[in-house]
Image (cartoon, grey):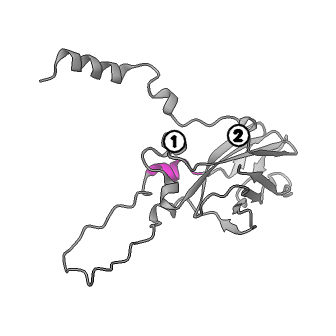
Amino acid sequence: MITRGLWLILLLSISAPGADKDKRFRVEPASSYPTKQSAGGLTIAAVPYVSAEQSKPAFGKVNPYDHGVLPVLVVMQNDTGKTLRLENMEMTYVTPERRNVDQTPAGDVPYLEGAQRPNFGGPPLPIPRRKKKNKLAIPEIDGLAFHAKMVPEGNAAHGFVYFQTGHRKGAILYIRGIAEASTGKELLYFEVPLD
C-alpha cells in the first residue's frame, strides 16, 4: 500500500515542470560552439562526446565512448547564398601525430564489439550460454547520426559521426567533399579543432 507521503513524492517527481527539459539533447547554432571553423559563409562546429555527462542527454545510459566509439557532434550553418551538396562529404579524425581515423558508418556501430577477455581457466564447459546484447545496439546511434545530403542556403544541418578511436588533445576533424549544388564546384577543406 502506498502512503500519502509516498504518493506526493511520486506525483511531484512525475509532474515537476522542467524536470526533464534541462536534460534533453539540444543542438545550438554552429557559431555558438568554441570548436568551429568558418569559410565563405559556411560555419562548421564539431564537439567530441567523451564524458558520460555529455553523452547522457543524447544516448541515455550508454556512453559510446566507454565502448570504443567516439561520437562527434557536427553542426553546419550554410550562409553561403547557395545550396550545398554533402553526398560526397568525407570526415576524418586526425590525431596530433597526423594519424587518420576514418568515419565508421552509423549503421555499423551497433555491430561493433569491444575486446573479449581471454579465457585462462582451461577449456570452456559445454554449457549453452546466452549471447550478451551489444550495448551499442541502441536506436539513438542511427537516429542522431549525420544523414544530411544537402543544406539549402540559410539552413543548418547537424548529427553525430562516429570514430573507433580514443580522443586526443590536439586532434582535428578534417572535412572535404562539400560542393555547390548548382555548379558542382567543391569548397575548400575544413579542419575543425576538437579541443
Point out the residue furthest to the left here.
1
| Quarter of the figure with the N terminus | top left
Q: Is 160 placed above or below 177 here?
A: above
Give the quadrant of residue 75: top right
Question: Is 144 covered by the magenta stretch?
Answer: yes
Q: Is residue 187 left or right of residue 110?
A: right
Q: Which residue is at a point 73% across and 44% down the rendered structure image? A: 35
Tell me the kind of residue under disc 2: Ala
Q: What element carries label 2?
A: strand
Question: Is 62 covered by the magenta stretch?
Answer: no
Dot 2: within a 10 Å radius of its alpha carbon, few (fewer than 14), some, or many (20 or more) residues? Answer: some
Image coords of residue 7 (percent x, y)? 23, 19
What residue range appears in magenta? Answer: 139-145
Image coords of residue 91 (percent x, y)? 70, 60
Dot 1: within a 10 Å radius of its alpha carbon, few (fewer than 14), some, or many (20 or more) residues? Answer: few
Q: Is the magenta region chiefly helix, strand or loop?
A: helix
Calculate the distance from the C-alpha at mark 1 to the C-alpha at mark 2.
25 Å
Label 1 belongs to which residue? 53
Image coords of residue 193 (percent x, y)? 75, 51
Tell me the kind of residue under disc 1: Glu
Mark 1 or 2, nearer chain start: 1
Point out the residue furthest to the bottom here.
123
Frontmost of labels 1 and 2 is: 1
Label 2 belongs to which residue? 156
Q: CB atoms at circles 1 and 2 under 8 Å apart? A: no
